[in-house]
Amino acid sequence: MLNKNRKTIDKFLQFLQVEKQYSPDTIRAYKLDLNQFLDSIDFEPPFPKITTKEIQQFLQNLTRKKMSERTLSRKLATIKSLFKYLIREEKIPVNIAKLIKAPKIPKRLPNYLSNSEICSLLDYPYGNQFKDSLDRLILELFYATGIRISELIKIKLRDIQLESSTIKVIGKGNKQRIVIFGETVNHILRSFLKQRAEIVKYNVSPYLFPQLKKSVNGSMHSHIHVKTVYNIVKKYIRQISTDEKLSPHSLRHSFATHLLDNGADIMSVKDLLGHASLSSTQIYTHVQIKKLKEAYNQAHPHAK
């Protein structure tokens, strides 16, 4: 029965890849969660005989291991997605996973950089080498467009429109959207592309940010690695802040927070970020409320 259940999971993952067009990273996360769930069951029954008891025990075991509510919620969502698929394929008579409530996830205010920190970060004294230009463009694009790291590394040269200062990116769920950048980034991007064109080994890659080292098979056709970008951003952030919580994603948070601080419409920010629902964008309004409360407590005579 073990093999049959695993084969069912493989078919489900194939469904997510082909029909839902989920990214390889999402597919890997789903596979890891589902195999972990099956491994948690002592005597693995076929899916039609799995009950809420097995799912709840799985979640309870993770809780004992000090897993966060966010992680628990994600793993339960994966299981719910599988059971929804099994209903669709008529593999089970009832979707028992629907009966299990997800744990409440505490709202965490996003870590972001202040205006002065952003200025210090982007005004850093970069050198004139290609690597310096690459570092600078990565930082500028993160803040100018609010894109995710997974979106940035996959930007292709053909997706860039210098005339209109726009880039087509592929976001979560393989959804396309257009992001915008200003004149400063346009100038930096043009300069980078000129330098890039002069380095023959990078010209074979269709990506804006080509891989910097050859693959095991000697290829140079892929894009820069996520870890490389993460390390680049962390290196520069450490020059202007001691807050270790700041990361590439903090530049995305900064993008959204600063737009709203300067009067941008929340629906426009939602679309620029590529959020599927407004609730994801509304976390940034909590940042504004927190700042207002701090100002009130400092300045109002009756605040204390």
Image: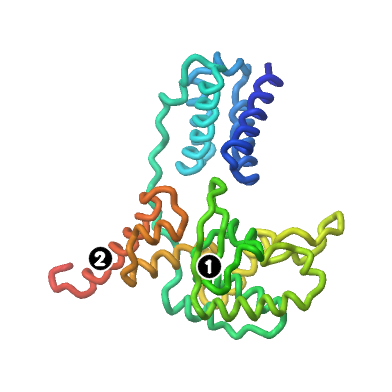
Locate residue 69: give its quadrant: top left
User: x, y percentage for residue 161?
Assistant: 58, 69
In the picture, which quadrant includes the C terminus? Answer: bottom left
* Along the viewing direction, whichever of 274 and 297 lies nearer the viewer: 274
Secondary element under disc 2, as helix, strand or loop, is helix
User: x, y percentage for residue 249?
Assistant: 52, 61
User: x, y percentage for residue 35?
Assistant: 64, 31
In the picture, which quadrant includes the N terminus? Answer: top right
Q: Is residue 14 above or below residue 266?
A: above
The first of marks 2 and 1 along the sequence is 1
Q: Mark 2 points at which residue?
A: 293
The label on residue 166 is: 1
The mark lying in front, picked from 2 and 1, is 1
Q: Which residue is drawn at 38% across and 40% down?
A: 104
Q: Colour scheme of this structure image? A: rainbow
Q: Residues within 10 Å of mark 2 (few under 14, many from 20)?
A: few
Left or right, 163 with respect to 135, comes to: left
User: x, y percentage for residue 39?
Assistant: 64, 27
Q: Residue at x 56, y 77 (%)?
A: 186
Q: Residue at x 61, y 76 (%)?
A: 189
Q: Which residue is drawn at 75% across and 63% down?
A: 205
Does residue 36 appear anywhere in the picture? no
